[in-house]
Amino acid sequence: MVVPVFDRLSKIEPWNHSIGNSPSFTPNLTLAPKRFHGETKSVAREQLPVGASNTKIKAGFLYVASKFPATDHHQFITLLSGRFFSNKQIGGADPIVRIDSGFSEHIVTMSDTKPLTVTDWRAETSLKGLELFKDNPPNSVIAVVDQTGRGSQEYLDICADLHKFGDRKLGAVTICVSKRTIDAQLKRHEGNAEYFPHLLLQRLRAMHGEANFHTDADQYFPARPGDEKAHLLVLGGYVSHPPADSAKHCPSVAALVANLDDTMVNWPGEARLQPTWKVSKTVDGASRQHIEAEMLNLEEMVTGRLEAWTSEKPRIVFYRHGLDGRPKEDIKVIAQAERETIRDAMEKRYPGAPIDVTYILVHRNTASPLGSVEDSGKEPGSFIVESSSRYKYGIRPIPSPDKDALICSEMEYLVG
């Protein structure tokens, strides 16, 4: 989440921090030498092999064909499915996913997705082959849409229907891709009649919560400043709210991503629905409705990320985005509540061990929530980040009331 967002970092004041409240750390602030941030370095990575512990992919194929009758649509998706279930995948290389070949007949071709959206689709289906999805549901759906004769909005609407069917009705991991994209991938490997686009396979593996790649931590962080034995778990949190013209009870979505290990190559995540609106009492006792900005299921999601963590007890750096436009006092309350929630999850996972949690607010500097960018720059640890998007971003650690942690010097690697 963090590294791709920030293309070039401009430090307002160079600084280093040590982590407090730990037997081996003494809080200490020192100037750091200036260096150019934004340098990129290629890191070698290896595709992880498939083993018995990997999820067995039970895949079904859905194909939304164009309405033009000239093409043999069913032949295309049948051949694509055959490439997938051949299990050779990328031409002699080790397979990327573990495939259950018993689902090779789960293929449905249609020109309209409406039959998938009916309430009782199991009883009312008129699509040939859909009965297999009913009797033996797959855990993965690969949906291909032919965009011929369709505009961009129609394509998006079709993908929405396919995701509604796969995600909500089947409870399956669902990937929606255009036929144009598939054709381009197959053309690049037209000499291999068994090739299946490996990027789709890697995406499928990742969506089942499994890592695709492995790299050497020492190569990625060749010289970590500070304590070289301390492991760093970086969390990225965001709450997305529905637009103003959405349905009355449309929920918000809270999402959290985190690295699996010290290499910081694989970043699986979790998401939860939560109410968009919150009702509170004003000073005079009146009810006030406002958007719920706090991540309500944060402890559950952090616990999930800690269970997925593959190394020893980590220090935590939590990057929080999505609080733009909130009043200053509200941000402080939310930050304190979320910090304590993360600490609670850590204490349950590592009872009795010292806990280091750093909370970093990420915001657009056009609406700096804790003062102007110029003011925030007077405090050590405040940054202006120039992004390739139309927004510039600010990042700043929020001081902890009990000074349980200060931002660590690895910050330079996480935003540089």
Image (cartoon, rainbow, N blue to C red):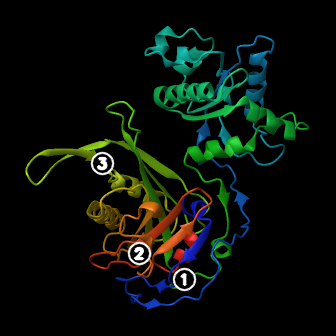
Numbered mark located on residue 228 in the image: 1
Cβ–Cβ below 8 Å for labels 2 and 3? no
Three-letter code, disc 3 = Glu
Q: Which residue, as the protein is rendered here, is positioned at the far left? A: 284
Residue 317's spot in the image, x, y percent? 45, 69
Which is nearer the N-term, disc 2 or disc 3? Answer: 3
Which is nearer the N-term, disc 2 or disc 1? Answer: 1
Q: Which residue is mark 3?
A: 292
Three-letter code, disc 1 = Glu
Residue 260 seen in this snapshot: no
Position above or below: 389 against 370: above
Question: What is the secondary structure assignment of the residue under circle 1?
Answer: loop
Position above or below: 415 against 151: below
Residue 255's spot in the image, x, y percent? 44, 50
Foreground: 334 or 229?
A: 334
Q: Residue at x 11, y 46 (%)?
A: 286
Foreground: 343 or 285?
A: 285
Residue 235's spot in the image, x, y percent? 46, 62
The quarter holding residue 89 reads top right
Report the Cα–Cα distance between label 1 and label 3.
39 Å
Q: Quadrant of the N terminus?
A: bottom right
Q: Which residue is mark 2?
A: 376
Nearer to us of marks 1 and 3 is: 3
